[in-house]
Amino acid sequence: LFYVFWEVMLVPMYFLIGIWGGPRKEYAAIKFFLYTFAGSVLMLVGFMAVYFASGTGSFDLEGLIGARSAFGLSFQALAFAAL
């Protein structure tokens, strides 16, 4: 649900910057959209990696703690960086 609302927030923020921005508002709006979208794709990859690596089929913290042996140290570092 967090990811869905993160993506929904992207559209109105684009228009807020594009309409009421400064002198280079179109450039700023497009740059904001691209950087935020790239970050959200990276976040989605992190969410999916944790989901599939856990094998629990959910993001329940107790289930993830139980499946922590499946997460190596390098995987944990990469997932943390992605999220």
Image (cartoon, rainbow, N blue to C red):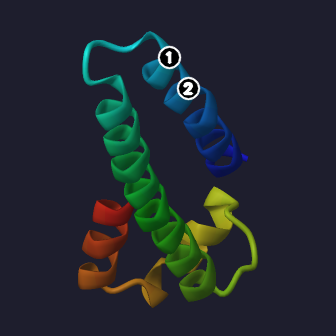
Report the side of 23 relative to 56 (left or right).
Answer: left
| Nearer-the-camera pick, 46 or 7 | 7
Against 43, residue 77 (above or below) is below
Measuring from the top left, give residue 25's x and y in whole percent: 34, 24
Residue 56: quarter of image: bottom right
Q: Quadrant of residue 26?
A: top left
Q: Indicate left or right for 27 with 70 as reference.
A: left
* Front-most of residues 10 and 59: 10
Q: Which residue is mark 1?
A: 19
| Mark 2 Cα shell of 10 Å, populated few (<14), some (14-19), many (≥20) | some
Q: How many marks?
A: 2
Type of amino acid at the residue the image marks with label 2: Phe
Q: Which residue is depicted at the point 46% across and 61% down?
A: 43
At 68% from the left and 40% from the top, the residue drawn is: 8
Residue 12, image x and y in percent?
62, 27
Q: Is residue 46 above or below residue 35?
A: below
Decide: is 19 above or below 14. above
Viewer-closest of 22 and 32: 22
Please say if the residues under marks 1 and 2 sit with CB atoms less than 8 Å apart: yes
Residue 62 or residue 6, whichever sits in front: 6
Q: Is residue 48 left or right of residue 56?
A: left
Q: Position of residue 57 (x, y in %)?
A: 75, 78
Q: Which mark is residue 15?
A: 2
**How many residues crowd mark 1 within 10 Å: few (<14), some (14–19), many (20+)?**
few
- Quarter of the picture containing the C terminus is bottom left
Alpha carbon separation for disc pair 1 and 2: 6 Å
SS assignment at label 1: helix
Q: Amino acid at mark 1?
A: Ile
